[in-house]
Image: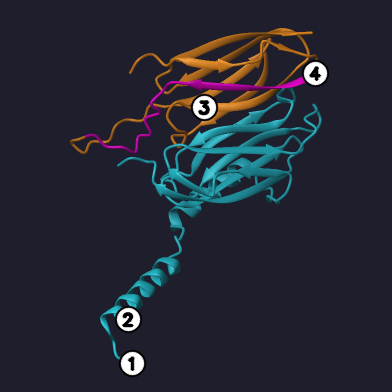
Chain colours: A orange, B cyan
Amino acid sequence: MATPKPRVKVPAKATKGEVITIKTLISHDMESGQRKDKDGKPIPRKIINRFTCTFNGQPVFACDMAPAISANPYLEFTAKVMESGTFTFTWVDDDGSVYTADNTIAVQ
Amino acid sequence: MILTRRRALALSAGATTLAVLGFAPGRPQAATEAVDQALKAFTGGAAPVSGRIVLDAPEIAENGNTVPVSVSVESPMTADDHVAAVMFLAEGNPTPAVATFHFTPLSGTAVATTRIRLARTQNVIAIAKMSNGAVFMDTKQVKVTIGGCGG
């Protein structure tokens, strides 16, 4: 599988104290470990097991995921912004790889 | 009553309907235990009550591979009083754990959406844990046309 590619939607601008909606998606098979290949051998589990979102280093939202999360895990959540800054998103894979994305927001 | 061909057909159709309607998907014992265990581990023994949390899921999911579910919990989301976490459980999946959302006061609201896999028609449970330890729960049945666990 190609390297998982994160896609994140964060508004470019917001007013102080506004609650914004953030949408994230990452391309990933989320192999559940329940499926079997042609020869009947189980395909080993390989999923993204944790997602975190921080704003200027402060935790905003996190999610622990089990194999019951669909392929290409999609998450939509909110954040309250009081100042301009950077959202950092991280996805942790079962094999230890970490995928990250950054988004800045300007607050008037 | 003479059993004509037409009547016989109608009768058998009725019987089939009854059989289908009468079939309630029973919870297997092992799954119930796993759900109870997960609940206990999450709540720390507090009894969940209904209210404040709303779980939104489709009544009928044609494809069990991607079922959109969202949750919203009523809360002021301040440092003293906010939703700490929301856990999703799917009773009828091989393993009931689905996801746990962790919120902070910076989240602004305790509203989130994701897409999950459901193996068959079953109840989806959402449990919210507040920062003060209170626990709220909502359940919704989702009818699944094509299961989403491969095989």
- Local SS, label 3: strand
Q: Would you name the residue on which mark 3 appears? A: A74
Q: CA distance from mark 1 to mark 3?
A: 60 Å
Magenta residues, as a range? Answer: A17-37
Q: Earlier in the sequence, mark 3 or mark 4?
A: 4
Q: Residue furthest left?
A: A39
The question of residue A30 being in magenta is answered with: yes
Q: Amino acid at mark 4?
A: Gly
Q: Residue at x 74, y 34 (%)?
A: B131
- Local SS, label 1: loop
Q: Quadrant of residue B55?
A: top right
In the image, taking residue B136 as reference, residue B119 lies left or right, namely: left
Instruction: Tell me how many marks there are.
Output: 4
Q: Which numbered marker is on residue A17?
A: 4
Do the CB atoms of the residues marked 3 and 4 lie less than 8 Å apart?
A: no
Q: Which numbered marker is on residue B7?
A: 2
- Local SS, label 2: helix
Q: Nearer the viewer, residue A40 or B7?
A: B7
Chain of the residue where label 4 is placed in the rendered structure: A
Q: Position of residue A27 (x, y in %)?
A: 43, 21
Q: Which numbered marker is on residue B1?
A: 1
Q: CA distance from mark 2 to mark 3?
A: 52 Å
How packed mark 1 is, by other alpha carbons closer than 10 Å (few <14, some 14-19, many 20 or more), is few
Q: Amino acid at mark 3?
A: Tyr
Q: Residue at x 44, y 26 (%)?
A: A72
Q: Amino acid at mark 2?
A: Arg
